[in-house]
Amino acid sequence: MNITEYFQDYKNQINSILDSSLEEKGLANNVSLCFNLVADYETWLKSIGDRLESLIYKNAIKVYQDALGCMLEGHYQSAFMGLRYCFERTLCGVYLSANELELRTWLDGRRDTYWTEIVGKEGKQTEDDEKGDDTNVDKGLFSKKFVKAFFPELQDERLHFRRMAISVYRECSEFVHGNPLALNRIPEHLEFNNELMSLWCDKALVMKRVMFFSFVLRYLVDMNEDKKSMVSDIINDEFATVKPIIILF
C-alpha cells in the first residue's frame, strides 16, 4: 500500500466514524450542547473585550474545537488531551488576569503556570478554614481572597466549583498521562466508541460550567449593561439557580 492508498483508507475510516458520531441519537443533545459551547465561549470573549488575557482564551477555544473534531472522528485520547488543555488555559487566563505583572511576565515567556497554582494545593484545610502551611488555596482562583475581590457574594459557591474543577481535570488527566485504566478504554484501532464519546461530552459540559463560572466570578460585576446583555442568555441557561448571579440582571 502506498501513501495515497493508505490515507485514502484513513479518510474513509474517519468519514465512517464521523457519520456514526453525528447519527448517534442517544447523544445528539449532548453533542449539540458541546458544539454550542464554542459560540457561547466566543460570546464571552466579545463581552470581555480586548484584554491581555484574551490571547489565552482565543487559543483555548481553538484547541477545544480541535478536540471536538477529534472526538467526533474517533481520536478519543487526543480529544481528552485538547479538552483538558482548553480547561486549564481558560482557568489560567482568569487567574492571571487578576495580576497584570504576572500575566505580562507569562506573556513575555519568563513565567510558567501550574495547575496547583490555579486551583490551590490539596492540603490540611477544612471548608471553613483554608489556612495551612502546606496549601496555597488562599492564592488560587477559587480562594476566599480571589472571590472576595471580584464577586464576594459567590463565597458559598467557590468550594463546590473548586471540587468540580479538580475532579474533572483529574479524570481527563488519566488520558493525558496514559493511566492504564484510561488506556484500556481506548480502542486499539480507529473506530467509533459510544462510551468514550459519551464520557467526553459529559466532561466537556462540566468544564463548560466551571469555565463560565470563572468568567462570571472575574468579569460580570464590572460589566456595563450592554456587555451583561451579551451574556445574559448564557448565564440564565447555566446559572439560573445561583441567586447572586441572576440578581444582577
Image (cartoon, rainbow, N blue to C red):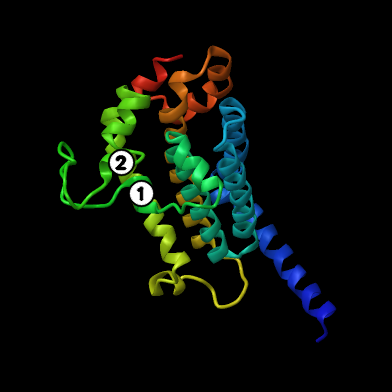
Residue located beneath label 2 in the image: 139
Give left or right: position of 186 versus 138.
right
* Observer-nearest of 111 and 22: 111
Residue 28 on image: x %, y %: 58, 47
Element type at mark 1: helix
- Mark 1: amino acid: Glu
Q: Is residue 157 above or below residue 223?
A: below
- Classify 10 Å Cα crowding around label 1: few (below 14), some (14-19), many (20 and above): some
User: Which residue is situated farthest in the bottom direction here?
Assistant: 1
Q: Quadrant of residue 188?
A: bottom right
The image shows residue 181 at horizontal and vertical percentages of 39, 71
Is 199 rendered above or below residue 30? below
Q: Mark 1–mark 2 contact, CB under 8 Å?
A: yes
Q: Quadrant of the N terminus?
A: bottom right
In the rendering, which numbered label is found on residue 214? none
Which residue is rendered at x = 35% and y = 49% of the image?
117
Q: Mark 1 or 2 closer to N-term?
A: 1
Q: CA distance from mark 1 to mark 2?
A: 7 Å
Check disc 2 and give the amino acid type. Lys
Viewer-closest of 115 and 167? 115
Q: Which residue is identified by label 1?
A: 117
Kind of element beneath mark 2: helix
Instruction: Indicate the position of residue 153 as horizontal and vertical percent values.
Output: 31, 22
Which of the 4 image quarters holds residue 177?
A: bottom left
Specify whether 243 is left or right of 176: left
Binning the other alpha carbons within 10 Å of mark 2 as few (below 14), some (14 to 19) or many (20 upward) gives some
